[in-house]
Image (cartoon, helix red, strand yellow):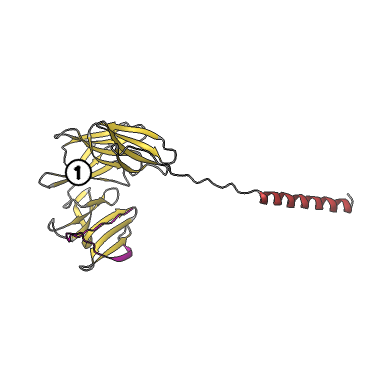
Amino acid sequence: MKKSNVFLLITLLVGLVFISFGCSEEKETPKKTAKEVQGVQIKTKEFQRVVGWLSKDSVLLQTKKSGVTYFEELNIYNEKKRPIFNTKESISEVQISPDYRNILLYSAESAEKATMRIIALNDGSTVASRSTKPLTTTFYWNDESPEKIMFVSYSPEWNFQIENWDYTLNQLDKIDVASPFISWYGDNLVISNNKDKPDDELGNLYLQDIRDNATKNLIVANIMQFAVHDNVLLTIEKNSDEKLLYDFRTLGFQNFFSYNAAREYDELGTFVPYFDTN
């Protein structure tokens, strides 16, 4: 091949490359269309509450009509509703499981009987249920083991009893903890704010393995409140009569952040230790 022909061929190829590159540069990258949250019209008398998120697109909606309570999955972008469960019983508590597969319903059937139910979110079937007395009860779902639910039941005299329900085995175990102010701290670990007297402002935070109720370890002394969220332990401590110390600790109890905040009181002078771990 002659040198002139080779040079012409190379020039032509280089030109085509630049033309192709220029065309690709001119093409605009498609812009993603942002989703818009849609307003949903619900009669005020029927609306009960939004229990919480089920996914990044949907929430659990609780409504009541003609004496029947309905639970539905509501898509916040297209307004579509998917029925999950309904009951005529009076609902006392609803919680979504940490893995977003089930919900816990605590309802009263009568003045003598209440029921704890685990309802599957995918089809509304009853995974497990347990009958109990209609007592004031608080529930604590285990993040690491969603099949475990710890609950504190209060008698009319405000005596309390703590139990752990493994609903996959339908097994109920009593937990020997000296305080009703508790939280899960792992698969089998519980932390509690123990006070010498119920009316005491300050207590001591203990760590306990529910498989060995005799062993307790002091974590933090003289705290007012605590909360566990994800991998963080938050304690509220009394810094002075006017200020509080908010301490943030790792799961290994190492402090990594703290700050002071003014104490807040209501109109009657009662201390309001409000905080939200969300």
Dot 1 crowding, Cα within 10 Å, few <14, some 14–19, many 20+: some
Q: Which corner quadrant of the image does residue 254 belong to?
A: bottom left
Residue 232 falls left or right of residue 198: right
Q: Quadrant of residue 102?
A: top left
Q: Amino acid at mark 1?
A: Thr
Q: Position of residue 26 (x, y in %)?
A: 67, 50
Of the pair 79 and 206, the residue shown nearer to us: 79
Dot 1: element: strand
Q: Picture coordinates of residue 216 (x, y %)?
A: 20, 56
Identified at 21% across, 39% down, the residue is 172
Residue 267 covered by magenta stretch? yes
Q: Quadrant of residue 224?
A: bottom left
Which stretch is magenta?
254-278
- 16 or 64: nearer the viewer: 64
Choose between 98 and 84: the one closer to the eye.
84
In the image, is residue 253 part of the stretch drawn in magenta?
A: no
User: Residue lying furthest right in this view?
Assistant: 2
| Residue hosting label 1 | 137
Residue 27 image point, x, y percent:
65, 48
Task: Say left or right for 63 vs 110.
Answer: right
